[in-house]
């Protein structure tokens, strides 16, 4: 296992695995303290040497209530060849028009299957278009090449305090 505060040490595998796998399980916590999982389709980028995830979604009552009380989510990717990515993130709703435009452009200009057509929303000004931003503070990447006898912990990145 390698633990680092330098994201570049696992950035290539992180971006490759999340782009290859596409869909992930995202878990929130209810007001009663119970986990709830759902499948989402984030696109991750890197800003200021840290990963940032973007999800085109709607502000459903359950998701909104969970995130209002506890903005932290667990993100899990798995592929049949056992490449895995785990990310622990702070989730925030994207409310600014400029940032909504950026998310819209990211999804509509990224080639499928990672990017996709958002025309069902009409425009980024549709109130139903309420993207989420994921700011990971911990990421773990495990290569399937290690399975089943290798280092199943893989590489871990933790955000530096204050970043």
Image: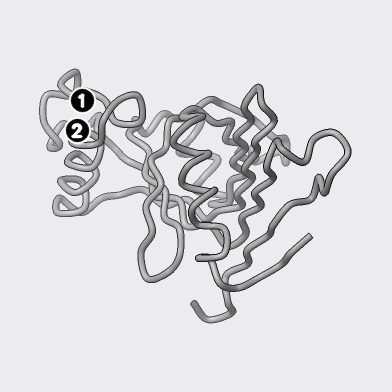
Q: Secondary structure at mark 1?
A: loop
User: Considering only vertical position in the picture, is 107 above or below 3?
Assistant: above
Question: From the viewer's perspective, is 125 left or right of 57?
Answer: left
| CB contact under 8 Å: marks 2 and 1 | yes
Q: CA distance from mark 2 to mark 1?
A: 7 Å
> Which residue is depicted at the point 60% across and 73% down?
5
Q: Residue furthest right?
A: 149
Circle number at residue 118: 1
> Which residue is depicted at the point 35% across and 64% down?
47
Question: To which residue does mark 2 refer?
Answer: 108
Q: Position of residue 137 (x, y in %)?
A: 57, 62
Q: Secondary structure at mark 2?
A: helix
Q: Residue furthest front?
A: 145
Q: Position of residue 1 (x, y in %)?
A: 79, 60
Nearest the eye: 26 or 67: 26
Q: Residue furthest bottom?
A: 162
- Of tags 2 and 1, the one toward the viewer is 2
Residue 81, image quadrant = top right
Q: Position of residue 80 (x, y in %)?
A: 65, 22
Nearest the eye: 87 or 112: 112
Q: Earlier in the sequence, mark 2 or mark 1?
A: 2
């Amino acid at each position: 296992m390698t633990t680092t505060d330098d994201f570049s040490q696992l950035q290539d595998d992180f971006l490759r695995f999340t782009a290859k796998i596409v869909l992930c399980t995202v878990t929130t916590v209810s007001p009663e303290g119970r986990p709830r999982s759902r499948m989402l389709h984030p696109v991750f980028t890197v800003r200021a040497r840290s990963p940032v995830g973007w999800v085109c979604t709607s502000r459903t009552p359950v998701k909104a209530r969970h995130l209002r009380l506890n903005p932290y989510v667990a993100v899990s990717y798995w592929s049949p060849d056992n490449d895995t990515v785990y990310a622990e993130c702070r989730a925030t709703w994207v409310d600014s028009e400029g940032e909504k435009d950026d998310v819209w452009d990211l999804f509509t200009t990224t080639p499928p299957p990672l990017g996709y057509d958002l025309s069902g929303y009409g425009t980024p000004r549709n109130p139903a278009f309420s993207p989420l931003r994921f700011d990971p503070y911990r990421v773990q990447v495990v290569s399937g090449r290690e399975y089943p006898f290798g280092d199943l912990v893989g590489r871990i990145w933790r955000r530096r305090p204050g970043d």
